[in-house]
Amino acid sequence: INRDTFDIQISVSDPEKVGDGMNAYMVYKVMTKTSLSIFSRDEVCVKRRFSDFLGLHSKLASKYMHMGYIVPPAPEKSIVGMTKVKVGKEDLSSVEFVEKRRSALERYLLRTVKHPALLKDPDVLQFLESSELPRAVSTQALSGAGILRMVNKAADAVNKMTIKMNESDAWFEEKQQQFENLDVQLRKLHASVESLVCHRKELSVNTASFAKSAAMLGNSEDHTALSRALSQLAEVEEKIDQLHQDQSYADFYLISELLGDYVRLITAVKGVFDQRMKAWAKWQDAQVMLQRKREAEAKLQYASKPDKLQQATDEIREWEGKVQQGERDFEQISKNIRREVGRFEKDRVKDFRVVIIKYLESLVHTQQQLIKYWEAFLPEAKAIA
C-alpha cells in the first residue's frame, strides 16, 4: 500500500456560468486521476458548484473536528464577487474573481485528499466520483466565514472553561501559544502582501500610461533620433508594464493566497484545540455528576430507603461508565491532535518552501527581463545626436 500512498491528482477547471441573473451560479469541472483502489475508476470527471464544496466541508467538519482532526477549510463566500459574475459584467475583476476562486477550490480539494482519514471518507469519494450529488442543504451558514464564526463561538465558550483547566501537558500549552502567535504574524504579513499586490497593479497602470505619453511625444517630435528613442522608450515601458502585471499575479497567486490559506488553516487548528477543551469539560462534568450520585446514595443508605437504593446504584454505574468514556475520549483527542499537528507542521514547511522558491524564481525572472529590456534600449538613447 505504501507505494501508492498518495497517487492522486485533482484539477478544478472550466468554470462555466449556468442560468441567468441572480439565480445564476458557476459550475466547475473536477477531474480526478488516481491509481488508488478506493476509487472505482482511474480517471473520473464530475461537475460541481461552489455550494457543493461548502457542503462537503461542513459534512467533514461535523464528522471529524470533534475527534481532533484538522479539516481544511473551504474558500469563503464572496457576495460582491459573485454578484458581479451573476449580473454578467465580463470585466477583468470578474474574470480574476472566477480564476481566484477556481484556484482556491483546487487547493482546498488537494489539501482535503492529502489527509489520510478524509481521503477514505464516503462523502469525499462521492464528491469526486458521483455524477449527481444530493443538493447541498443550506450552505449559507457553512461558508468559511460561517465555520469561523462557529469556531469563535466555541472558543468563547471554551475560554470561560480554560481558566479552570489546569493543563498538565506542557506540549499543548506551548503549541497553543505558538499557533496564537503564528496567527497574528500571518495576518499581518497577509495584509502587507495584499497591499503589495495593489501597489504593483497600480505601478503597472501608471507604467502603461507613461508608455502611452512617451509614444505620443515621440510622434510629435521633429528630431528623428529623439523621436525614434521616445518611440522605443514607449515600447520598453509597454513590455515593463506586462512584467509588472505578471509579477503582481505571482505576488497574489503564490504568496498572498498561500498566506490566506494558512490564516484559515490556523483557525481550523485552533478549532481542534477548542474541541479538546470541550472533551475535557465533558469528562469533568461527568465526574462532578458521579460525585453527586454517590452522595445521594449515601444519604439514601443513611435514611435506609432500600426501595430507592437500587436506582441510585444503577445511576452510579451509569455515570462511572460516562466518566471512563470521558477520560478515554479526552486521551484519544489529545493523541489525535499531537499526530495532526505534527502532520500540519511538516506540510506547512513543505508548502512554504515550494512557494518561496517559485516566488523568488519569478522575481529573478522579472529582474533579468528588466535588465535585458533596458540594456537593449541604451544604444538607442546614446544614438540621439
Image: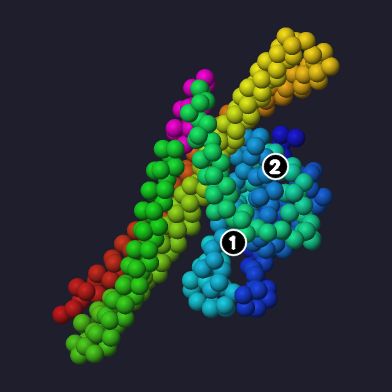
Magenta stretch contains residue 205: no
Q: Residue at x 45, y 58 (%)?
A: 252
- Neighbor class of circle 1 (other Cα within 10 Å; few <14, some 14-19, many 20+) is many
Query: Which residue is painted at 70% across and 13% down in the image?
Result: 299
Residue at the front extreme of this rendering: 303
Q: Amino acid at mark 1?
A: Arg
User: Judging from the image, what secondary structure is the residue with disc 2 in?
Assistant: helix
Q: Give the answer, above or below, for where 371 lies relative to 316.
A: below
Q: Is residue 145 visible?
A: yes
Q: Position of residue 233 (x, y in %)?
A: 28, 76
Q: What scheme was used to colour the molecule?
A: rainbow
**Residue at 48% over, 28% down:** 163
Q: For the magenta stretch, what is the residue range?
A: 168-179
User: Overall secondary structure of the magenta stretch?
Assistant: helix
Residue at the disc numbered 2: 63
In front here: 43 or 303? 303
